[in-house]
Amino acid sequence: MIADLKFTCRSLSKAPAFTAIAIVTLALGIGATIAIFSLVDAVLLRPLSYRQPQQLMRIYTEMPTLKFTRFGASQPEYMDLLREARAWQSIDAWMSVGANFSAREPTRITAALITGGLLQTLGVPPALGRLITSRDDEPGATLTAVISYGLWQRDFASERTVLGRDVLLNGQKYTIVGVMPQGFRFPPGEADVPDVWVPMQIDPAHLSGRGEHFLNVLGRLKPGATLHQAQMELDALVERSGKTADPDRFIPRFHTLVIHPFQEEVVRGVRPALQMLFGAVCFLLLIACVNVANLLLARAEARQREIAIRGALGAGGWRLTWQFLVESVLLSTVGTVLGLILAEGVLRLMKSLAGADIPGMLDVDIDGRILFFALGVTLVTGVASGLAPLTHVLKQNLHDTMKAGAAATTDTAGTQRFRQTLIVAQLALALMLLTGTGLLLRGFWKLQEVNPGFDPKALTTMSIALTDARYSGGAARDFWTRLEDSLKNLPAIEGVALTSNLPPVQQLTHTTLQVEGFVPTLEKPLKSTDFLQVVSHNYFDVMRIRCVQGRLFEERDSAGAPPVAIVNQTLATLIWGNEDPIGRRVHLYKSPDWHTIVGVVADSKNAGVENPTGSALYLPYAQADSFGEIIRNFVLSTVHVVVRSAAGPGPAVNAVRREINRMDPSLPLAAVRTMDEAMSHAQSRPRFLTAVLTAFASIAVTLAAIGIYGVIAYAVVRRTKEIGLRMALGAQGSAVLGLVLRRGVLLIVCGVAIGLAGSLAATRLLSGFLFGVTATDPATFVTVPLLLSAVALLACWFPARRATKIDPLAALRAE
């Protein structure tokens, strides 16, 4: 073994060009594969870091008539589940909220309100102190909090005396009783992971309405219970509820319960994208293996005389095979070492591109599992790239090879066909990968051209949370009024507006609407709006959202004036179709008044740049008393300040921060960013996929070009005597050029034809990732094959051109 390794090292050192090309090719393919597998392993394959995570299930409510799926539960519904579900060890709930946190100075964090048994259900012990218990969750109990390891480090300098310390959360005093271990995250998969967990303290005597679906429900199945059994139990619960006299309980045709494994729900949004990336990188690795196989085949053929001598001296087929496998595995091993270094850089780049948009992305690292995978890739690529070409070389007749010696100038027909098959396969795979990338690039380009419905230039946004008890009731509306008055005359600000939500990605606020003159039936249930947005009267002017019909809000739409509303075009069409909505009235859930529609505005993106615009209803914050208490407390709890300033975000943010500190120093200013940054962030996932696939496709095209260049160049070298003889007999350079190019063109045509057929089948899997283009986009399917053919033809031209420079006398004399 050692002797074989030493011999292989000496042999490879004598062919530095071959060795370098093979190692770099394998490093690119293996490095990219390791990076993507690291991501797939961390996000899709590795179980959640909780106790027996396979028993954890998400429980959703669904409303088929309203087409609401995977919806939260209300407090009464949660209490029904606690009383009547039997297949569960525990059922707990949580909700994530933005919170103002004060330990030393006010900061904005994410907090999770949880039921008392949730942390015990997860089965993760604290790093310090204790967990929240059912006693902490009793109404009226002392308010306790468990903080994250990161918050403990940032705000408390990892002091163990943090236990028992009081902090302010949304203006209320909480006592810290525990610190969770490093790396703990709940709920997982969210961009803003909570730093604080506090008891929800649901009071059974004062539950919220059944229409307020804000609870996320997590259950742990009993040992031996199956998902099917648990679902059947919930179906029976819903059926029983439908037969009761209480019309607000679960009704099978209107309101159902469904269960999904928690792990699958965490990764549901990113699973297709990661599977696509892993498939693409497997294509890239296969292309790299084919390329190296071709290189090894050429090297083995050049060593036919050496192989023949070894065979004549008694070396059997297995001994020869072993020697060449050592060579290919050694190349693969060095390529893997370099690939690991490359993978580390690729992971850092992917983290900067995707960040928190992919759950678990920031924690992806190369660990023991990945090193074990890398070892497997090393062996597979080494054997695959080394064994395939060697089988053809070992089939040669040793007597004929010894007899031909150095005078052999042509390969066997079988060897030629095998090499050509490898190149055709390489071109076909490269074309399939390049076509998929081309479709994504076309879609991403179209995404940049989408009109968001507003002008993001020179806009800066920031948010303020009014979540403590001081801003309950009408105090929140009064704060909005004082804030607007203090900001509108600031210097260097062209316009300022206030809103409860911001485009292009808004928090979904499904709100049921009663429409005047509309009688709901089972077939035609109540109408609803996807987004309910409260704004200042000048919001549309500052955002430059166009008024399509009627008028915008005005200062006369104040408290005491007739309640008014504005709808976007999507909601107007959904409710009234082609009829005129101006003057029509709608009624909000549990609101005291009807709201008259006074205007229709153009659609502006609210559900993401790549998604259709959701239906939106706009209300003036000055008329908050007409919303009803439930909606008023919800929509006025967060103020987003929108500033239009040509001077840039710096002066505008400083001016707003000074005013906020003057009005209430305990309120932190959070989420400060320009609207251009918000638009860019909304496109981060398609940008990430497009960037990674573009890198893969570029490498694939480069490898394919190198592969076909190597085949044609090798053919020229092997046919030097033939070409020299042709030129000696009078063949012109153009004839020689055509002779060499014909072989390359035939390979290109075959590879492109097979690749096109494969692309037509494979790109259908990309349909869910494309925006504005189809999976069979004609422009892509014409441009990409032409591009690959041009690159491949250029790779053929260089050795063909070199063939025309062969000196006939020198070629014949060399033989």
Image: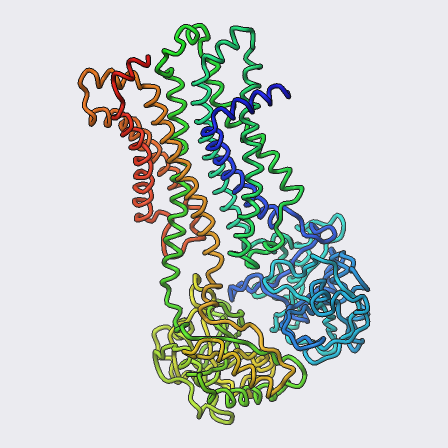
**Which residue is more in the foreground, 809 or 516?**
809
Count of number-bearing discs: 0
- Locate residue 330: give its quadrant: top right
Q: Where is residue 694 shown, x and y percent of the image?
A: 43, 48
**Which residue is more in the foreground, 785 or 311?**
311
Q: Which residue is drawn at 62% across and 70% down?
A: 214
- Locate residue 729: give its quadrant: top left
In the image, residue 431 above or below residue 425 = below
Camera sees residue 794: yes
Q: Where is residue 165 shown, x and y percent of the image?
A: 79, 73
Quarter of the image with the C terminus in it: top left
Q: Where is residue 528 shown, x and y percent of the image?
A: 49, 72
Camera sees residue 132: no
**Which residue is more in the foreground, 211 or 814?**
814
Q: Where is residue 628 shown, x and y percent of the image?
A: 57, 84
In the image, residue 509 above or below residue 782 = below
Q: Residue at x 30, y 32 (%)?
A: 798
